[in-house]
Structures are given as C-alpha cells and as structure tokens.
Image (spheres, grey):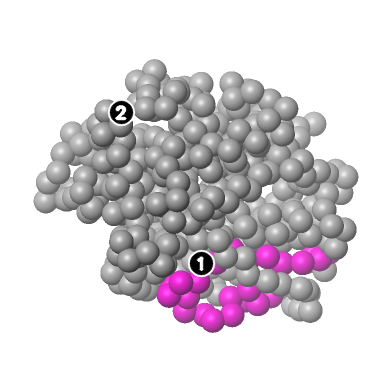
Amino acid sequence: MNSGISIVGSGHTRFGRLQENLEELIVAATREAVEESGINPTDIDAIFLGHYNSGLVSDGFPSSLVHQAYPQLRFKPGMRAENACASGSAAIHAGINAILAGKARTVLVVGAEKMTSRSTSEVTAALAGAGYQNNPDEAALSFPQVFGVAVREYEARYTSPLDAMARIAVKNHANAIANPLAQMHKEFTFEHCSTVSSSNPEIAKPLRLTDCSLITDGAAALVLTTNENSKSFPRSVSIRAATHISDFLPMSSRDFLAFEGPEQALTKAIGSAGIALENIDFAEVHDCFTIAELLIYEAMGLTPKGQGARALEEGIVYREGALPVNLSGGLKAKGHPVGATGVSMYVQAYRQLTDQAGDIQKPGANLGLVFNMGGAAVANYASILEAQKS
C-alpha cells in the first residue's frame, strides 16, 4: 500500500542484557520518541505495542504499560500486535491502518521485549512456538534447526553458503561497533566465524554460534502522523510504501529456500514506491540467522538465486558499498528483542534519513529499505522510507 504517512519522532533504548523491566523499557522508548518529535502527548490518538507473547511475557497486559509514560495518555485506546518476530512491524501497520481509516491522525507505536530474564532453553522453546505445531517433525524443530535446514538445502541446491555466512557475521559485528545502542561491541574475524571451535560451537548443524542472533532486552518507539500534519514537525520521513505478505506456516507446504514471501514483499514495496533497487541507499533487514540475510540478498534482487555470496564478494552490502545492509549491526550484533525488532529497524532508518545516525550515518541517504520477518519467512513486512528534507 502507498501510505501517505510519515514518521516524526523516534525512541530507542540500548539493546542488551538490561536491568530495566519491561515497563521501564517501554516508558523510556516512549518518552524519547515523544520528546524528539515535540508532540504534546494529548495529541496522540492511539497506541500500538509490538510484543511477542509465547512464554516470554512477564507482564500479562503490556499494551497498557505505554500509558505509564505520561498521564495525558490515560484513556487513549491501546492494543498489542503480535506476529512472531515481526510483531513490531505488525504494530506499525496497525498504526498506519488506523490513520488511513480516519480513526486517528497521530499514533504512537512501541516495540518491546524482555528476554534475558528467561533461560536460553526457555527462550528457544518460546521462539519455536512461531513454527508449525500440527506436524510432529516441524514442531520438534527449534528455530536454529529450522535455519540449519535452510543451510543444508542451499548447499545441496547451489553451493556451500558457510563462508558467505561467516562474512555476514563479520560485517554486522563490525557495523555494530559504531552503534552505541547495539548489544555487542566486539569485532570478529573471518577465521573465528568460519571455524567450529569451543568458542564458536555448532548450535544446530551446520549453524555456528556466530551465525545466530542474540537474546536481547530492549524497546523502540515511533510517532506516526499524516504527511500533511508532518509539516508541523521539525523532522519527518515519509513511508513511501509499506507491504505485508504472509505465506503458509508449514514448511512442507512451500519451498522454504525460495523465500517467496520475502521476495513478494520486497518486490511489491519497491514497485509501489515507484523506484528501482539501485535507488535505495541502505537497508535494514532481518538477519535472525546469517543464512537469512544471504537469502534476503537474493529475494531483493541483488543477485540471482544461489549467488548471494556475490553481494559480499563485490562489496555491495558493506558500509562503503552501493547498498549497505544492516549498518546498525542488525539482529546479529545490535540484538533481537523480538517484539522490538521491527520498530527498531524503522527507528534506525528514520535516524539515517534525518541525519541523526551518528557514527553509522550513511552520508546523503535519501531512500531506505526495511525488511522484517516473522517465523520462517511466514510474516513478511517490507517498507520504503524517504527523507523529507527542506
């Protein structure tokens, strides 16, 4: 859909293993977004919270925690959106739809998750709930195992992607070092990421630890309004196109490796924006596992199928390349608080397009791509954001 809607403010906590509880994270991101936009909280018409609820939740009614940020938010309608790891994007689309329907002019969208209070096994089990549960074979798979299947199928169909995956990990960790909000500020070498060792064990053969995103706490927030109303704000970024494509949940019902849902979402967003891929200045994409980022290169059309490694070999997706991918560090190094991830991607893109990205700024950025994915390429959200500079 073409939205006619703009982002006019953003908030983003540090990602990582944090002391703050879920309410404190939500309130911090909300207040930053409201203060950055300059809006009076009274002028917010509705609230949408992205939050994954599959055994991770510690506060049973989190959408109403947003109201804790300002007394003026009392009695504003609020709701939680859930769509697995794309819950943040689901909340953004709910906000966009409320504005398009004429039910609101300005909305607040927040994404938040508190994950590190749970054990790794508990988080793994909770995330596995986003897989198909009515087939015993699929229900038995953790998400690392699901994407391990993708790696093995890629090798059988094309060639081994393992070296390319290691280079993606190295790239994203290098980018995260310059992002003060990222969870992990640690440089990794190709040798470390490409070698199975005691410090880089196989998590789900052949996925290595360095191929997997992080268990994270954090929150992010956006203020959305109509393009017309955005003219009264100091900074605005237009959502030029926003698409949502959902695929079958069972992996057995589709060719998982083809990434057809992501490809359709990306193709439709780029087409709806009336641009070409080469017009895009940067992209924030869903690298829950390094193989996912590789498949997204192919889904967006950077390379033909089976040749995603070329995007790395030719330098396209690096910081100084033609289309830098995950300048923030991505889920791989910035962190992946699942309910917050989609909103975080939009915040990072908004700050790039308003020259507020600091040491990860892409100079002169005008068009950004955001791609957030829920489940194993099931819920797919792609958007094109455009700078509105005076």
Quarter location, residue 48: bottom right
Q: Give x and y (percent) for residue 380.
A: 56, 48
> Which residue is tagged 1?
52
Q: Residue at x 52, y 80 (%)?
A: 59
Q: Give x and y (percent) for residue 36.
A: 69, 53
Asked whether 139 or 310 is in front, the reply is 139
Q: Quadrant of the C terminus?
A: top right
| Residue closest to the far left | 198
**Residue 363 in the image: above or below residue 1:** above
Q: Give x and y (percent) for residue 225.
A: 79, 52
Q: Give x and y (percent) for residue 376.
A: 43, 51
Nearest to N terminus: mark 2 or mark 1: 1
**Residue 191 in the image: above or below residue 112:** above
Q: Residue at x 59, y 80 (%)?
A: 61
**What segment is highlighted magenta in the picture?**
43-69
Name the mark on residue 133.
none
Q: Is residue 167 visible?
A: no
Q: Is residue 178 magenta?
A: no
Q: Is residue 56 magenta?
A: yes
Q: Amino acid at mark 2?
A: Tyr
> Which residue is tagged 2?
158
Q: Image check: 47 left or right of 142?
A: right
**Residue 205 in the image: above or below residue 276:** below
Q: Is residue 102 visible?
A: yes
Q: Residue at x 60, y 54 (%)?
A: 89
SS label for mark 1: loop
